[in-house]
Structure formats: C-alpha cells, structure tokens
Amino acid sequence: MAVVQLVAVAALSAVLALALPHGFFEDWGWMVGPGAWIACAALTAMMVRLPAAPTLLGALLAGIPSALAVVFGWHWLGAAIAVLLFAVWCSRLPSQGPAFSG
C-alpha cells in the first residue's frame, strides 16, 4: 500500500505541477495538498481493497506530521514520513478481498 500511495501522490503532484503555476501552490497549497493526499488515500483504499472510512482516517492522522514538516520547510520529507505512517496504519486494516490486479 505504501507503493500505491507513493505513486498516486507522485503522479498527482507531477500533473498539478505541470498544470498550475508555482505561485498557485504558495497561495493555495495548504488547501490543495491535504485534499490531494486524501484523494490519493481513497484511490489506495480502492486499489488494495481496504475499508474506506478507516483508511481515510489513517490518511488524516498520517498527514498531521506531514503538515508539521511543511511548517518547518521540509515538505517532501513530511510526505515521505506520511506515506510510511499511512502504510503502517493500513497494514493493520482488514482487506476486503483480493487487491486490484490490473
């Protein structure tokens, strides 16, 4: 699940970075970032067949250290830590069947 979340976050970040000017993220990143993180977590839950509500709760909780890292200017370190915490959280959740196979 860490790989799915990491790929989803990286892909969405790349698309947004290409589509929007840097100034947009300086002004609105505080709002877009958490929304993108939750959207990627929802995709991860769907792809690896995890229950949505507990998975999204885990994403919310894992995002807290990431938000603190942003305050100190360590955005990508915070994102990496959040992915790891999210994976630990999700590893404790019951699967709802076989993972997405392509």
Image (spheres, rainbow, N blue to C red):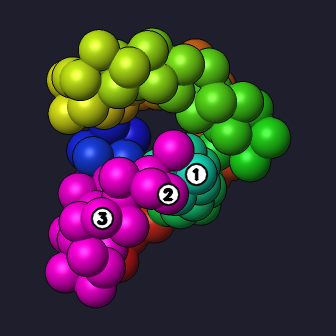
Question: Considering only vertical position in the picture, is 89 above or below 32?
Answer: above
Quarter of the image for residue 7 reads bottom left
Q: Position of residue 73 (x, y in %)?
A: 23, 23
Q: Residue at x 49, y 57 (%)?
A: 28
Quadrant holding the C terminus: bottom left
Q: Work out whether residue 66 can be spotted.
A: yes
> Which class describes the residues within 10 Å of circle 1: few (<14), some (14-19), or many (20+)?
few
Residue 62 image offset from top left, x and y in percent: 52, 22
Q: Mark 1, mark 3: which one is toward the viewer?
A: 3
Estimate the x, y position of residue 18 in percent, counting from the top left. Answer: 19, 81
Residue to which mark 2 is pinned? 28
Contact check, label 1 and label 3, Cβ < 8 Å: no
Near-viewer residue (86 or 77): 77
Farthest residue, direction bottom: 19
The residue that appears at 38% across and 67% down in the rendered structure is: 24
Kindly identify the amino acid type of the residue bearing the numbered disc 1.
Met
Give the image quarter of residue 77: top left
- Residue identifier under label 3: 23
In the displayed structure, 12 sits above or below 73; it is: below
Q: Which mark is residue 42?
A: none
* Magenta segment boundaries in residue numbering: 7-30
Q: Amino acid at mark 2?
A: Trp
**Which residue lies at the image location 62% right of the left edge and 20% below the top edge?**
61
Is residue 20 shown in magenta? yes
**SS at mark 2 in the image:** helix
Q: Is residue 66 magenta?
A: no
The secondary element bearing badge 1 is classed as: helix
* Spatial separation of the CA atoms under disc 1 and disc 3: 14 Å
Q: Dots 1 and 2: beta carbons under 8 Å?
A: yes
How far apart are labels 1 and 2 at the CA level? 6 Å
Q: Is residue 9 left or right of residue 60?
A: left
